[in-house]
Image: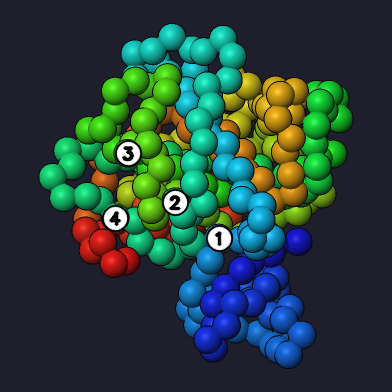
Amino acid sequence: MKRARIAWAGAVHDAIEAGGQLELRTPAFKGRRLSFDEVVWLPPLQPLPPQRPRTVLALGLNYADHAKELAFKAPEEPLAFLKGEASLTGHRGFTVRPAGVGFMHYECELAVVIGRTARRVQKADALDFVGGYTVANDYAIRDYLENWYRPNLRVKNRDTCTPLGPWLVDAADVPDPMNLALQTTVNGKLTQQGHTRDMIFDVPTLIEYFSSFMTLQPGDLILTGTPDGVVDCQPGDVIVTAIEGIGELVNTITTNTSA
């Protein structure tokens, strides 16, 4: 099942994909169908209790070809950093390119949504702890980069810099997350192609690794890295990051800080 979270008629609603439309699941409107153009798309994640922030883990250099593209040696263990939830935005949203920036690029990534509490999980059991998958576009601003292995906050943890969506696809509907094609287009031109089988550390390995020293909770995210083929994005560019069986995430670059 493909699930979505949208804003419509002054409220936030859960919805599912049904016959090329959005079918609302909110009790007062349950069964009502809307077109994709009638709504504002939000990150397809359930809200968490106020006392528990969402953990967003992101991977650097998790594809050997991307590490080579950047002239770096492939890592021997996962290179991870944290992101704040304010960095997340929805499908068809806008991402701000700061004034004066010289190089800002997309990163098409498979995002793993944890489905149940995971602590000291073994690799063989790891996929049992996945609730679903979505598409992430984890923008990076190279101007602020001091260290590819540990990118600082201004590179990756910016408001609007991580579009997510459009769908949260149930884990049961993705038999093998390590067998999915990825691609990115900029203004309709294909600029990036890759495959999840080329990850250095696959999804089960990442869940085993992170859960060995921290507890992963339902709703937490793991962004699994990007293959090579990143290019600079300018204001007005429309970026589509797509993953086979998961969806096509549309995002537009803007200079409007109120976007």
| Residue at the spot of label 1 | 43
Residue at 81 percent of width and 26 percent of height: 120
Which comes sooner in the sequence, label 3 or label 4?
Answer: 4
Image coordinates of residue 18 in percent, x first then y, are 70, 74
Given the current orientation, which residue lies at the most extreme front position? 51
Image coordinates of residue 165 in percent, x first then y, are 55, 57
Callout 1: helix, strand or loop? loop
Type of the residue with mark 3? Arg
- Residue 154 circle label: 3
> For mark 4, does the 10 Å Cα neighbourhood hold few (<14), some (14 to 19), or many (20 or more) residues?
some
Disc nearest the viewer among 3 and 4: 3
Closest to the observer, 240 or 98: 98
Image quarter hosting the C terminus: bottom left
Q: CA distance from mark 3 to mark 2?
A: 11 Å
| Residue at the spot of label 4 | 96
**Horizontal arrangement in the rendering, residue 15 relative to residue 140 (left or right):** right
Which comes sooner in the sequence, label 3 or label 1?
Answer: 1
